[in-house]
Image: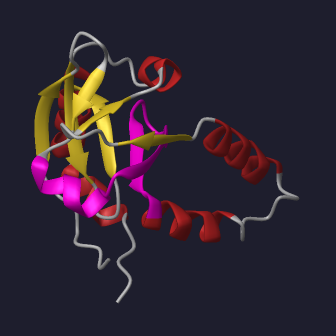
Amino acid sequence: MACEMMIGTYEHRLDSKGRLVLPSRFRQEMGEQLVASVGVERCISLYSKDEWEKLLEKLQKMPFSQSKARDFLRVFLATAHEITLDSAGRILLPQMLKSHAYLETEVSIIGVGDHLEIWDRETWNKYRQDILSNLSTIVEGVEWKQ
């Protein structure tokens, strides 16, 4: 399946059983089998099986001899969970991942190119505002590869 870029922000709610409806625009792209893990910030990273396999190939090239690489790999892979999209387009997020992202009810699902991130809505709004208020400085510090 050719990967379309996942972009945009969608506001949703966890239901009473802790399930989350994925935006319909992402369901076909993501497929039924997903992998969720901790995000680098306080969010959940959600990958299609194909994108997860591509990421694993990159991760396997990290130098396990370096402690920071070992620490990252251990936590990222140990917190990964295989998740199945149900017939209603919902996923059930593990409690450990919901705790990591401080998810309660109101969430923002954001497309970040090759995967999705699930954020507590208030945390996302604050993070986004902080980044937007410093955007010109951030852009100046980013290396653009041609």
View extreme (front): residue? 87
Can see residue 94? yes
Looking at the picture, does residue 140 appear above or below residue 94?
below
Residue 55 screen position, x and y as percent? 54, 64
Looking at the picture, does residue 69 appear above or below residue 13?
below
Tell which of 50 and 136 is nearer to you.
50
Colouring scheme, one of rainbow, by chain, secondary structure, one colour: secondary structure
View extreme (top): residue? 16
Residue sitting at x 42%, y 21%: 98
Assess whether residue 116 is covered by the magenta stretch: no
Where's the C terminus, which quadrant?
A: bottom left
Q: Which residues are magenta?
A: 24-49
Residue 42 screen position, x and y as percent? 42, 30
Looking at the picture, does residue 58 appear above or below residue 81?
below
Residue sitting at x 22%, y 14%: 105
Label count reads 0
Can see residue 124? no
Where's the N terminus, which quadrant?
A: bottom left
Instruction: Decide if residue 107 is on the left or right side of residue 70.
Output: left
Q: Which quadrant of the structure image shows residue 51? A: bottom left
Assess whether residue 44 is covered by the magenta stretch: yes
Residue sitting at x 74%, y 42%: 71
Residue 12 screen position, x and y as percent? 13, 29
Instruction: Decide if residue 55 is on the left or right side of residue 139.
Output: right
